[in-house]
Amino acid sequence: MKIIIASKNPVKIEAARKSFCMAYANDEIEVIAVDAPSLVSDQPMSTQETRDGAVNRVKYCQQSHEADYYVSYEGGVDILDDIPSTFAVVCIANSKKLQTGRTASLPLPNQIYQKLKMGEELGPAMDNMFNTVNIKQKGGAIGQLTNGLETRESIYVSATLLTLSAFFYPKLFV
């Protein structure tokens, strides 16, 4: 089974690989990483912009590559239940269907959120606050703020498996 992941970020590549290996344990899984444009802001600041970025990445890959599945992850920020939060949208498609899902959300410290509103990206803002380097390709803000109990990869895997449910039971998700 050939999977195109719309990113060269090692966290996203590994999340897609793990998810599909779990979901399709009897299949040989080949994961190919592709740079794909989101066509949204570097730091999406709404649920809709985040979803648009994930969908745009998958559609780009569908136009330029042949695969069984296409997967993208777009990290974003929004006010959820009156709390500044970060989350990611996962988009999965095959030749018949495109489905999106969302990770759990993580509340953000107000000082980080203020930096994001001024145009900074979450990864660099977290690196500055916690004196880390390239946190977005490691545990992410999630790993840092949960003391490693969850990571960017772990919530991407969970969201990917949940989103795949629409492909496991396609007649139920018309």
Image (spheres, rainbow, N blue to C red):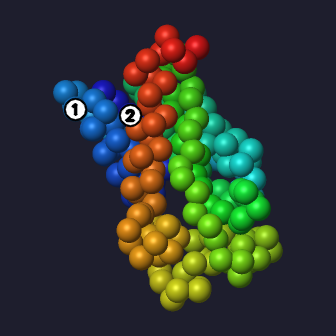
Q: Amino acid at mark 2?
A: Ile
Quarter of the N terminus within the rendering:
top left
Q: Work out whether residue 63 or residue 121 is closer to the camera in this orientation and state it.
A: 121
Q: Work out whether residue 152 or residue 33 is closer to the camera in this orientation and state it.
A: 152
Which residue does the numbered mark 1 point to in the structure image? 25
User: Is there any visible trace of residue 63 in the rendered image?
Assistant: yes
What label sits on residue 153 in the rendered view?
none
User: Is 122 placed above or below 103 here?
Assistant: below
Quarter of the C terminus within the rendering:
top right
How crowded pointer 2 is (Cα within 10 Å; few <14, some 14-19, many 20+) is rated as many
Left or right of residue 54, residue 68 in this image: left
User: Residue 6: percent from the left, percent from the top?
Assistant: 50, 44
User: Is there any visible trace of residue 34 in the rendered image?
Assistant: no
Query: What is the tally of numbered marks visible in this picture?
Result: 2
Q: Residue at x 41, y 38 (%)?
A: 161
Left or right of residue 153, residue 48 in this image: right
Q: Work out whether residue 19 or residue 119 is closer to the camera in this orientation and state it.
A: 19
Q: Amino acid at mark 1?
A: Ala
Q: Residue at x 22, y 32 (%)?
A: 25
User: Residue 172: percent from the left, percent from the top?
Assistant: 51, 14
Instruction: Please tell me whether mark 1 sits on a helix, a strand or a loop.
Output: loop
Instruction: Please tell me whether mark 2 sits on a helix, a strand or a loop.
Output: strand
User: Is 142 placed above or below 55 here?
Assistant: below
User: Residue 88: percent from the left, percent from the top?
Assistant: 58, 52
Q: Earlier in the sequence, mark 1 or mark 2?
A: 2
Label 1 or label 2, whichever lies nearer to me, is 1
Residue 10: which quarter of the image?
A: bottom left
Left or right of residue 141, residue 66 in this image: left
User: Is 166 placed above or below 36 here?
Assistant: above
Which residue does the numbered mark 2 point to in the structure image? 3
